[in-house]
Amino acid sequence: MTLNAELSRRIYTDMWRIRLFEEEALRQTSLGSVKGTLHTYCGEEAIAVAVCAHLRDDDYVLGTHRSHGHCLAKGAPMDRMMAELFGRATGSCRAKGGSMHIADFSRNILGANGIVAGGIGPGTGTALASRIRKSDQVSVVFFGDGAAARGPFHEGLLFGSLWKLPVIYVCENNGYQQWVPRKNVAVVDSVADMAASYAIPGVSVDGQDLEAVYEAAGEAVARARNGEGPTLIEARTYRFYGHSLGDMEEYRSREEVDDWRENRDPIKLFSAWMKERQWLGDDEDEAIQGEVAAEVSRSVAYAEESPLPEPEDVLTDVLDTEWRVSA
Amino acid sequence: MRTIALRDALREALHEEMARDESVFVIGEDVIAHGGPYTVTQGIVDKWPDRIFETPIAEAGIVGLGVGAALAGMRPVVEIMYVDFITCAMDEVVNQAAKMRYMTGGQASVPIVIRLPCGPARLVAAQHSQIMESWFMHVPGLQVAAPSTPYDAKGLMKTAIRSPDPVAFFEYKALYVSEGEVPEEDYVIPFGKADIKREGEDATVVAIGGMVPRALEAGVALEDEGYDIEVVDPRTLAPLDMETICESVRRTGRAVVCEMDSSFAGTGAEIAAALAEQCFHDLRAPIVRVGSPHVPMPFAEELVNVTVPDSAAVCDAVRKVMA
C-alpha cells in the first residue's frame, strides 16, 4: 500500500502516541509512580510505525529492551502498558514483566526482551512455525546495533536465510551500545552490510525518514510473504534520551542531542512532509496531539485506579499448573 | 511383553507423538543423517519430511528457533548432540524458554522439549561427558526429566512433548542400548511421580538416571550381607516427588542419595537437604551422598573409573548408613 493521507495520519498519530506515552512515563517515574527503569524509544518512532503499518494482526513482532514503540505500533493497548509500568495487576504482564517484557499475545506481540539479540532466534522460530503450518504470516524482529555483535544475530540470520523463512530483521542503529559509540566497537559501519554474509538483501535507510523506512519495510514484508526469504533492514536513528533512566550521558555532547532533536526529529519531519502534501493542517495536527494527550491521561488514570498485585500472585505463572497429562 | 532398547523407546515415542499431533517437529544437528548419533530420530524424515530440520552447528540458533516456534504454537523436539553443548544456548534455555510464561504474566506457553544426551559413555573426556541436571533444576519454569529405563523413557517423552512448558530431557548415553519391557499401546508417565524400582526395608537408596541400574546391582550384592535396600527413582527432578522419597525414608530410617554428577551443589544435595528438613526425626543415621568428586570428566579409563560412582560405591554408602 502506498502512503496516502489517511494512512499517513494514522501513522503520524501513532508516532505521537509513542512519544507522549513515554514522556508521561518519564514524568511518572520522577513522581515515583512508574517503577524500575525505562529505555525510551523517543527519537526512533518512525521505524516501529512504518514497519508495523505493513503488518496484519496475525503477523508476529518481537522486540528489545526498548520496545514501548513496537508494542504500541502493533496495537498493544496503552492503558494496560501504563498499568504494567506502574506495577499494577491489570498490566500487560500482570506486573510480572515491567517495561522490558511487555507482550500482548492476543496481537502476536511476543514480547519485548531484556537480552540483547534475545528475540532474533525466537523471531526466526515463529517464521519457521509459519513455514511448517503453510500460513502466510510474517515475523518482524526488532533489535539494536549492539545485537549485531552477538552470536544469536549471526545464527538467527543463518537459519532465516538457509530456510528462506518469512522474517524481517529490523536493526535500529541509534549509534550507541548503551554508553559506547558504535564506531568504537564495530568493525563495519553499516549493519546492513552484514547481510551479505548470509546471502540476504541488506538495506540501510534513514530511520528518521518515515517514507524511506515505510518503502524498505514494504518491500521486505512483500518478499517474506511471497516466500522469498528474509531481509535485513538497518534504520539509522538516534536516542533522544539516555540509554535508560539515570544515564548521565557523558559519552555524547549536548550539542549533538540538540541537533538531532531540532533537525532530525522524525515527528517534526513527517509532520512537515504531510503538510507539504496538504495531508495535514495545523488544526488537525493540534487535534491529533490533543487526542493522544487525552489517551495518555486516560492510561494514567487507568493505572492509578488499578489494584496492586496480591502477594500470592508471585507463585503463579511459573508453569501451567492446571495441566494434566492423559493417555 | 516385548523388550526394546531405551533409544528405540524414545524413537517410538517421537513417532507416535508426531503421528498424533501435527504441531510436533524435530530440529537438531545430524537428525536426518543416520537419525542422529544415537539413531533416536531415525525414520522421521521418511514419514514427515517437512517436520524434521537438520541444522548447522549453531546451538543458540537451534534452541532459539525452537523457543519461537513453541511461542507460535508448535511443539519442537530439539536434539542437542551432547548436553555439554547446551552451554552455547543457555540464554535461549534460561532467559527465553524458562522465564517467558512468568514474564508475560501467563500469556506465553513454551512447549519445547530439549533432548540432552548426557553422561560418560565412550571415553570422550570433559566436554562430551557432563550430566548437568542440577543446573536446570535450579531454573524456575523448567521441567527436568531423567529416565533410567526404556519404559520410563517412552512414557516420560510422551508427557514431555504434550506438556505446555519447557522440558530439559536427560538421556544417559550409557543407557541407550539397555533393554526393558515397553508396551506397544499409548501410555504416559506424569511428571513428579517417583517410581520404586526395588522394594526393601533396611535403607532407601535414591538413584538418578544412570545410577539406577548401579543401585539395583548394589541391591543384589548387598543381599549376601543381609541388607535389603529400597531403590527409589525420582524419574523427574523438577518437579521432584519428595513425598514418595520421604515416605520410603520414614519406613527405612536410612537414606543414600546417588547421582553420577559431581555431588557438590548437585541434585543429591537438594534431595538430601529436603530429607533433612522433612524426615530428620525418622533418620537413624546421617544421610550419605554418592556422586563424582568435583572434577571435570577425565579421559583415561582408569581415571573415569575412580570418578564416576559404581555399584561398589553404592554398597559402601549403604554399609555406612547401616553401621
Image (spheres, coloured by chain):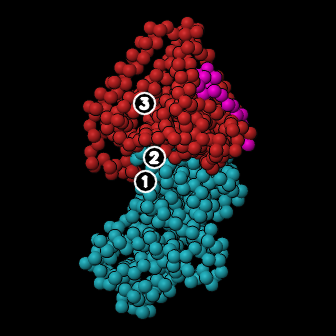
Nearer to me, A32 or A298 = A32
Left-right relation of B312 to B271: right
Query: Which residue lies under the disc numbered 1?
Result: B141
Q: Please state which amino acid type lies under the numbered disc 1.
A: Gly
Tell me whether the residue at label 3 lies in contact with that at label 2, contact meaning CB atoms closer than 8 angstroms.
no
Residue A234: x and y in percent read 64, 33
Per the rendering, the mark at residue A22 is 3
Same-chain status of marks 2 and 1: yes
Magenta stretch, residue numbers: A197-214
Left-right relation of B155 to A195: left
Nearer to me, A225 or B270 = B270
Question: Closer to us: mark 3 or mark 1?
Answer: 3
Does residue A105 appear anywhere in the picture?
A: no
- The residue that appears at 41% across and 12% down in the rendered structure is A287
Per the rendering, the mark at residue B100 is 2
Density class for disc 3 (Cα within 10 Å; few <14, some 14-19, many ≥20) is many
Residue B42: x and y in percent read 66, 57
Residue A272: x and y in percent read 55, 14
Residue reaching furthest bottom? B225
Density class for disc 2 (Cα within 10 Å; few <14, some 14-19, many ≥20) is many
Q: Is residue A68 magenta?
A: no
Question: Closer to us: mark 3 or mark 2?
Answer: 3
- Mark 3 → mark 2, Cα distance in angstroms: 24 Å
Same-chain status of marks 3 and 2: no
In cyan, which chain? B
